[in-house]
Structures are given as structure tokens and as C-alpha cells.
Amino acid sequence: MKQKDPKLGDMPAEDFRRYGYEIVDWIANYFEHIDEFPVLSQVQPGWLKDSQPKSPPESGEDFGDVLKDMDRLILPAVTHWNHPNFHGLFSTSTSSVGVFGEMFAAAFDMKAMLWRTSPASTELEDVVLDWLRQMMNLPDEFEGIIYDTASVSTMHAIAAARDRANLKIRELGMSGRDDLPLLRVYCSEHVHSSIDKAVITLGLGTRSLRKIAVNERFEMIPEALADAIDEDVENGFVPICVVPTIGTTSSTSVDPVDAIADICEKHGIWLHVDAAYAGSAAIVPELQHYFKGCERADSIVTNPHKWLFTPFDLSVLYCRDLDELKRAFSLVPEYLKTSDESTVKNGMDYGIQLGRRFRALKLWFVMRYFGREGLIDRIREHCRLANLFASWVEASPNFEMLAPVPFALVCFRACPSDVDDLDALNERIMNDINASGEAYLSHTKLNGKFTLRLSVGSIRVEEKHLMKVWELLNQAVT
Ligand SMILES: *Cc1c(COP(=O)(O)O)cnc(C)c1O
């Protein structure tokens, strides 16, 4: 159907209102019935693409027709991250108020580059990040900035670390110079690939990334780090940054940040803590001991879009001295100079982006709606459920645990006594469960063993959802 009355300008307000109500109803139904969908989309690659015309629509369509395609074409091709049985990777989900935050942010369509182009976004960002800092028990001097993802947060932190080395890289770059020593960044063998990508992007190269051995609990060995740094310094290399992880992607192991901070302090090396996943758990008093040493870091990244019920994307980089980040990135062209520069914060000074989305709003909604207590209760419950699941694994003769459970990820495998090739068995079990659409699990390799990962983090997850997975797993081994 053609659009009824194509005029210039936007959709008429009464149509916006009507479709808007319809969309909110649609989303409310979606959340209400989310566990009736297959967790993983069941379509084949290319299915959606093949459904679409090869050329763009010539004249405007009736928006009611467009909306019908949400059910017909989009929904089947959605993998439901909000599904309470999404246990793969890290289970992340949005709250309803988070969706409201995105609606308003899209409506304002602000670009937070300068304070004056977006006072609300600039100031609310400071407010929510200070609230979150207090909840995470980080010292007063830490100041944050919001980026899209942890990958980008970490890249900025390492860029600031590179700047601190005083090698004039900002002005002279790294190419065509024979006066530059090899710069080194250190992390554990279990580090997230975003650290590798950061050193690639920053021109340091993967050669600059030195991966340190871990102990039997998959935690970086501080003595091995100290030895590696001593050896590098002897060779004339320049250590610029150490990146311990609290909650590694593979097993959520916790590197000993306090001991690592001693080493960084001794050598004046930038300490950047990757707590992209587990950072949200720092708001829970009984879990704060895992974060010991973070108060000594130069920077720390946490992703409220992972485990704080805030829709993707929202990552926070806290810096002990945000001015170091500013020195690395601030560049004010004539057309962006304003008279209020010295008295206000301009978001564009703290990274490569000029315009920045109004992301703080959704986190403000989440924090105000749930409160600190409500957020703590939910994360605490996820940890309880993960430990409950782990207790079922431990009590079963057919399954075994393969890593400790500091937060809400369970690493385990099936190990029935009559099967020789356990890797093949566990891979088959995972693929069968995922193909069924009933639940989604992912895997990792720990000590060479194919390991099933069950992450508990959805705002909608309950004990019955874990019982369902446990049932599926037990059916698969018998
Ligand atoms: C998820 C994760 C990342 C990457 O997060 P993005 O926001 O998707 O870039 C980095 N580090 C750790 C430890 C993670 O769990």
C-alpha cells in the first residue's frame, strides 16, 4: 500500500502517536512472551536478505505495512538475548526502563560533543557515573566517560598509557622513526581479544602484547609478570600498560590486581583493569573483595550493558586522572571553540568520537527505577542461581566442574564414565541444545578441555529456567 498523503516534513503527529502506542504494546507483549521464542534464531544465513527487494523503495510505504514485517521478517531472524535461557557468551539483557531511555535519546537526537550542544547529556553522564562509582566503591578521584563498548574504552585507556610514556607519539606518530623502542603491554593468556585489537589499532602491533601465564585457577601469576617486565626493561623495551582482568571472558577468573598494582607502581606503568563483565558485581558488598586493588588502578572499564540491565550500548571508562585522557585526545578546531570551554566539560575532548549519543539517560532510568538495592538483589540472585547450578553439577556422577564460580558463570562438562571422547560428546550436547531453541550455551577451552559455559545474567531468569537446562543436559547424556 502506498502512503496515504505524502507531504514534505515528518510523519504527522497523530500517526506517530498511533504507531507509537502500537509499538509499545508490541514490545510489552514481546517481553511478556519472550520465553516462547527459540533462543537462537532458526533461520538460515541469507534468509532475511533474500526476502528484501534488490532496489530501494521508490515511493513511501504505509508505515502499518512496514510494521507488519516486524513479525513476518525481523522476528524470525532475531536471536533473543533477552530470553531467560540465553546462557551463552555472557547473558545480558535490557530492562523495560532501559528501552524507554533509548526512546527518549532517539527523540532528542543530541550529539554530545560540546556542553552547549547537549547540557543534559554532558551533566547527566557525570551524575550517573559518580553514582555508579560510589556503588562500585571506587575512590572519589575516579572520573568516568561513557563509550559504546569495552573494546573502545580499553583502546582509549591504552592510548592514554602510550601518551604517558612521553615518546611524542601524538605529534610524530610511530612510523618512520628509528628512535622508538619496542613498547610493551601485558595481560594474561586469558585476556579478551579487545586488548589485541587495541594494540593493533594503536600501531603498537601484536608484537607489543606480552601474555603472562596463569595459575590453575586461570589467574595471572604476578611473579611471572614481574619477571617479564624485568626482562623487557633489560632488553631496552618500554612497558607502558598492564591489563589485568576481573572476570575473564573464558571462565570469569580474577587476576590479582593488588599484587599487580605493586608491580605497576614500582615501574610507573599504567594499570588498566578490564572488568567489562564483572564490574557490575562490584556493587554487591560481599563481592567487593574481588576488586581489591582497583582503587590503585589508573583506569578501569565496566559495561553496564552487560550486567546492569541497560540496553546495548553503554561502556564506562573510569580514570584516576581524566585529564590524561584529555591530553591524549583533545583537539579543538576553530569551528568548535566556545566561550564556555574553561568552565565546562566537553565530551569530544575525551576520545576519537566527536558526536556522542545520550547514553547516560538509560542508565539514569535504570538506577532510579531499581535503586542500588534492587540492582544488588538481582546480581546477588544471579550469583546464587549460578552456584545452585554448580551444586547440581558437583552432585552428579555424569558432570564435573572445570573452573571456580566467583560470579555467575558456570564452566563444566559432561563426563559419563562410558564415553572416551569427552570433547566430541560435549560439543554435540551443546550443538543439540542450541539447535533445539530451548536454551543457548556456549563453550571455551580450559586446560585443553572442551568446556560448556552457562552464564546467568538475564533480568528475567528464574530457578525454573536453570532447571530446564539441567533437564536438557541430563537427557543428552543418558
Ligand atoms: C565482553 C567483554 C569485553 C568486550 O566488550 P564489548 O563491550 O563488546 O567491546 C572485553 N573484556 C571482557 C572481560 C569482556 O567480558
Image (tube, rainbow, N blue to C red):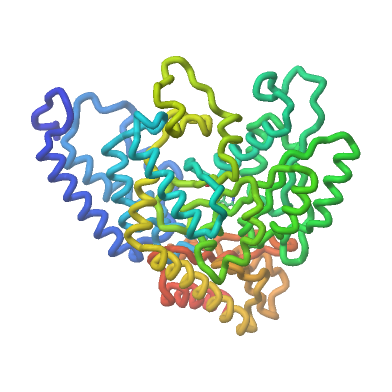
Residue 103 percent coordinates (x, y): 28, 45
Position of the N terminus, as image quadrant, is top left
Residue 109 percent coordinates (x, y): 31, 34
Which image quadrant for residue 329? top right
- Residue at screen point 51% across, 67% down: 284
Residue 26 percent coordinates (x, y): 23, 54
All told, the count of numbered labels is: 0
Left or right: where 213 falls relative to 315? right
Q: State the residue in front, 280 or 8.
A: 280
- Residue at screen point 59% across, 49% down: 300
- Residue at screen point 54% across, 67% down: 408
Which image quadrant for residue 159? top right
Residue 371 percent coordinates (x, y): 37, 63
**Residue 429 visible here:** no
Q: State the residue in front, 214 or 105.
A: 105
Question: Does residue 238 lie above or below 212 as drawn?
Answer: above
The residue at the far right in this view is 234
- Residue at screen point 34% across, 33% down: 118
The residue at the far front in this view is 343
**Residue 20 visible here:** yes
Question: Does residue 70 lie above or below 454 as drawn?
Answer: above
Left or right: where 342 falls relative to 192? left
Left or right: where 298 falls relative to 1? right
Position of the C terminus, as image quadrant, is bottom right
